[in-house]
Image: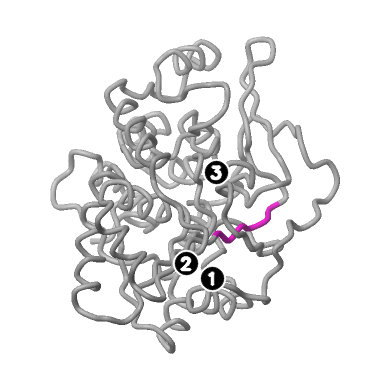
Amino acid sequence: NRIWLDPVSLGFGGLKKIAIKAKNVEAEALVGLAYHDLVNFLEDSHEVVRFPYDWRLSLQKEAERLAAAVREQLQRTTLPVRILAHSMGGLLARVMFAQDDALWQQLRQREGFRFVMLGTPNSGSHSIVRLLLGRERTIKYLALLDLKHNQEELLAILTRYPGVLELLPSIGERDYFKPPIWQELKTAQTDGWTLPQESDLNTAAKTWQLIKQSPLDPERVFYIAGQADLTTEQLRFNNGQIEFIGTARGDGQVPWAGGIPAGLKVWYMRDVVHGDLAKHRPAFEALQELLETGATNRLPTTAPATRGLAEGIVLPPEDEVERFPNERDLVAAA
């Protein structure tokens, strides 16, 4: 039975059934609401090989599975092999390249190879810190739905997911992969959340070492950035209270600064938030052109203008949800 993003399953305590030590859990398919239309469009020009991955697990582990799938295609055909990845999927590909240099070299030598990232958090995201503190919309929805677990119990499950911790910010003045910052946060906000385990943080830190070592060829690797009114960019302490600071220069989950790797060509989807980057129909032809040629004139290469104050915006203490979420709400929040 499907659990993740299914309101009924989650309502009856389903998140516990996919706790990190749960047995017989697998990623069975892409999220249809997020990717179905783009897959159908690209199937007119490509043979689309879907790769659903288990976002709960460490990217190091899932990258091994991805490498096997990519190598299978390289052996099966002499046609170009291209990778299109949304959000965390881009990090998965980068970990694969770092762990398997021979595969990276083989891809680079294949004529027509390209790798396009859609909103990949290439330096992590402060939205994950807000999530783990119980302030983000996603956890609010999950807690509202779940009839068996409260928010703190749900966060205790999420905090054990290596894949979640591997999305923590990897740049900035604070080291989110060491216990001291979490102790400092616990002093400021004592209730409603669970401290990450040091061993889990160590695993996440090793994953970021791989990502930072991962090769990026600007002739073959490209980035698509979205745009939202506000994106969480940093955390600060103000009189012992936790504040999150936002920017208008981001896609709602990933700031352009840090998200977009230096040296890569970037195109922007104006007014398209992070979760919609792979389902924005007006950009489908642009994505096809990028995959096929490495260039497109269908999207701008300059960052869109921001409305009003662009930097240093103090976010509300926590997101508010006004109704029970449906599947579409859960997909948008995730």
SS label for mark 3: helix
Whether label 3 touches label 2, CB < 8 Å: no
Q: Residue at x 47, y 54 (%)?
A: 87
**Callouts 1 and 2 close, C-beta under 8 Å:** yes
| Dot 3 amino acid type | Arg
**Which image quarter: residue 273?**
bottom right
To which residue does mark 2 refer? 34
Is 225 within the magenta? yes
Q: Which mark is residue 130?
A: none
For label 3, the residue is 137
**First reached walking from the N terminus: tag 3 or tag 1:** 3
Magenta span: 223-228
Question: From what the image shows, is residue 331 above or below residue 19?
Answer: below
| Residue 293 percent location from the top left of the image | 52, 77
* Residue 137 in the figure: left or right of residue 304: left
Instruction: Identify whether 289 is placed above or below 241.
Output: below
Q: Amino acid at mark 2?
A: Ala
Q: Is residue 8 above or below residue 49?
A: above
Percent position of residue 83, x then y: 39, 67
The quarter of the picture where the N terminus appears is bottom left
Q: Position of residue 11 (x, y in %)?
A: 36, 50
The numbered dot on residue 279 is 1
How far apart marks 3 and 2 lie (CA) works out to 18 Å
Residue at 43% over, 44% down: 142
Q: SS class of the residue under badge 1?
A: loop
The kind of residue tagged 1 is Lys
Q: Nearer the viewer, mark 3 or mark 2?
A: 2
Badge 3: few (under 14), some or many (20 or more) residues near its Cα, within 10 Å?
many
Q: Residue at x 46, y 25 (%)?
A: 176
Q: Is residue 319 magenta?
A: no
Left or right: 94 in relation to 191: left
